[in-house]
Image (tube, rainbow, N blue to C red):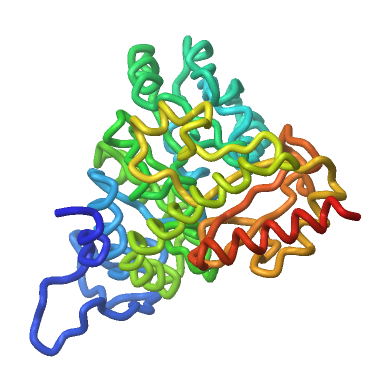
Amino acid sequence: MNDATRVIRAGLAPAAKGEEFLRGPVFAGAYHLEDDPEGSAFSYGRTNNPTWVGYENAISDLEHAAATVVFSSGIAAIAATLGVSLKPGDVVVMPSDGYYGSRVLANGFFSKFGVDVRFAPTSDDAQRELLKGARLLWLESPSNPGLDVCDIRLLAEAAHAEGALVAVDNSTPSPLGQKPLDLGADFNVSSDSKITTGHADLILGHVSVSDATWGGKLREWRARVGSAPGPMEVWLAHRSLATLDVRLRRQCGNALLIAEFLASRKDVHRLRYPGLPSDPAHEIASRQMKLFGPVVSFELASRKSAELFLRNCKLVYEATSFGGVHTTAERRARWGGDKISEGFIRLSVGCEDAQDLIHDFSEALDRAYSK
């Protein structure tokens, strides 16, 4: 079965006369629990919920995973992965150009508990040089926000040879764009607030694993720490999965056309999109990605130029996050924490008509440089 079909069918109960296709969310804090609770699938709302199970089964099907655990946010999924795999004295190798929240969590919190955090860039597989003695290799490919790419299979093999586990933050490609578990990763972490659900209306995350034992440890972490998602959010996520293939293919097609347009502009610099044949990461990305994603990054001459460009766009919402059906963009340096220029823009391409977007960008760029 192809993914385009799988996203529509994944996690649904067998057809039964008079039953809905996707059963509604189960709102429960407590369940009937007579006598010995041992063996009961559902006992308390912080521990488990049937709505979670349906979504987790669907994601496991898409990720080719032994198990999936859903969390209240992407950062909760990241914290859980670090929490179940690391102890005081362990070494984690992180991308220095990856998601800022992951770096802060590792270096600002886990390091306080005795975890040694090492950083290296995503490009040129530089993290490979820091694997000696590591317990966990954390990858992000393409990286956020710079869109550098590393060879996941090569790095996973190198990490395993050193006795290290491998986790990949797969938020930028989504389950349809890239399958890290097939490339050798032990953990596949995702912010489902973004491409996977795609409507900018919920916060959610998941971790998929190649060994079901880790699934049990992640569920225990979720229950003990309390990072349980709301059933309504999980149900909305499962409902949104059905359109993932349609949404993402439209977004990726738009992103490539827009990247080609931006490449033609002399006022656009350091353009990155792995789907462009001219992109330095295209060769590696083509080997391990099925779809190149909706995110494009580029630089304008200055902070002023970037702000004027965004202000003059009529079809772009200025907002953080990415992956939704609406095209969004932001001057990423306004948040700090990333080694990027003041004119750096992260663009998340939506499902609008590509030619409308290109016309809008062209006029906005012209206005930004005419001031």
Give the camera-side residue of 179 and 361: 361
Q: Which quarter of the rendered picture does the N terminus lie within? A: bottom left
Answer with left or right where residue 362 lies relative to residue 134: right
Q: What residue do we see at 82% from left, 58% from top?
A: 367
Q: Is residue 51 above or below residue 121?
A: below
Q: Position of residue 46 (x, y in %)?
A: 41, 64
Give the camera-side residue of 302 and 17: 302
Q: What residue do we see at 46% from left, 33% from top?
A: 277
Q: Position of residue 358 (x, y in %)?
A: 60, 58
Answer with left or right where residue 311 lies relative to residue 128: right
**Is residue 205 in view from this perspective?**
no
Give the camera-side residue of 168 and 46: 168
Q: Position of residue 184 (x, y in %)?
A: 30, 28
Q: What residue do we see at 60% from left, 56% from top?
A: 321
Answer with left or right where residue 189 lies relative to residue 238: right
Which residue occupies the extreme left position in the image? 17
**Is residue 107 in view from this perspective?**
yes
Residue 37, by quadrant, is: bottom left
Q: Position of residue 251 (x, y in %)?
A: 46, 57
